[in-house]
Image (cartoon, rainbow, N blue to C red):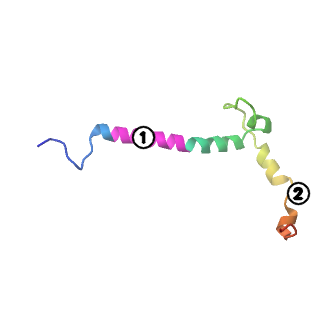
Amino acid sequence: MSAYSVTEPSKSSKWVAAALVLAYTFITLLPLVWIISTGFKTGPDSISYPPKVIFEPSLEGYVNLFTTRSRGFRGVAAGRNLV
């Protein structure tokens, strides 16, 4: 018989599993962090090439979002533009 248990994973397999979970978490959350950080960039910074990773945060986009009026979809809400 061997000294290894079928139900208890070894220390090395636990480390590999933890590394895989951390890598998956990083890869999954990176786009979300990028999207949220882009929301705090100014207009030119958000479309600059190469992309700016280090920038001065600004609330300009959110201020414009909540203080300016949109003229794009007035007719759709009233049902005038239904096909």
Give the mark count. Answer: 2
Outermost residue on the left side: it is 1
Q: Amino acid at mark 1?
A: Leu
Outermost residue on the front side: it is 83
Q: In the drawing, what numbered circle is on residue 71?
A: 2
Q: Is residue 20 magenta?
A: yes
Q: Which residue is mark 1?
A: 20
Secondary element under disc 1, as helix, strand or loop, is: helix
Q: Is residue 34 left or right of residue 11?
A: right
Vertical placement of residue 51 versus 83, above or below: above
**Residue at image point 87% right, 65% down:** 75
User: How far from the left and from the top, in percent, is residue 78?
Assistant: 85, 70
**Residue at image point 76% right, 43% down:** 59
Q: Which range is magenta?
A: 14-28
Quadrant of res 60: top right
**Residue at image point 84% right, 70% down:** 79
Q: Is residue 62 magenta?
A: no
Most common SS among magenta residues: helix
Q: Amino acid at mark 2?
A: Arg
Q: Is residue 3 left or right of residue 71?
A: left
Vertical placement of residue 80 versus 5, above or below: below
